[in-house]
Amino acid sequence: MKKLLLIIMVMFLAFYSDAQFTKARLQATGLTCSLCSNAINKALQKVSFVASVRADIKNSAFDIVFKQNDDIDIDAIKNAVEDAGFSVGSLKLTGTFTDVKIAPDQHVKIGNERFHFLYVNSQLLNGEKTMTVVDKNYVSAKEFKKYSAATKMSCLQTGKAASCCVKDGIPADARIYHVTM
């Protein structure tokens, strides 16, 4: 019985790539004063998987720490900023990874989210790594145009799985986040 349990655990670990996002650095746009920063800070603190937020007023940035073992919803972060009346200028996610394989134009599931990697070298992610979200409404229009030139996959334009993703077994219209390292 113990051997069977051990075999099942080993098989589970073989198919499970371990990754957990632990924190983020968000750069906001449209801030003009400390009251603006406070509005975003309060909005981010209300997001269910956020453990803490520290405002960096000088740089219009926010350091966000996620609750341990909670799944994150990247769009919920963006929506909180937009609901406060501002925009996301950049979002960098930091996580701890164990044997997560990435490659250019590859889709990878991390937690409950799917990520499409752009401008990366094929590699195995181990330890703490940071990735930048490059979808529309997460970077400037100029930056988005640059990233759009990096792939012929149509999912970048919509943020939703398209024919280019379905071939990888991703359900049609599933949310796809485009990132770079």
Image: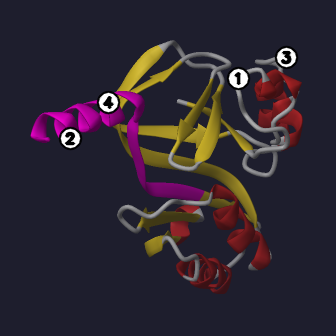
2 vs 1, front mark: 2
Part of the protein shown in magenta = 1-26
Label 2: few (<14), some (14–19) or many (≥20) C-alpha neighbours in 10 Å: few
Task: Point out the tag, 1 or 3, that comes first from the N-terminus.
Answer: 3
Q: Can I make out residue 51 in this image?
A: yes
Q: Residue at x 80, y 51 (%)?
A: 137
Q: Is residue 2 magenta?
A: yes
Task: Point out the tag, 2 or 1, that comes first from the N-terminus.
Answer: 2
Q: Position of residue 7 (x, y in %)?
A: 22, 31
Residue annotated with mark 3: 152
Task: Point out the tag, 2 or 3, that comes first from the N-terminus.
Answer: 2
- Mark 3: secondary structure: loop
- Mark 2: secondary structure: helix
Tag 1 near tag 3, CB within 8 Å:
no
Residue annotated with mark 2: 5
Q: How is the image coloured?
A: secondary structure
Q: Is 73 placed above or below 104 here?
A: below
Residue annotated with mark 4: 11
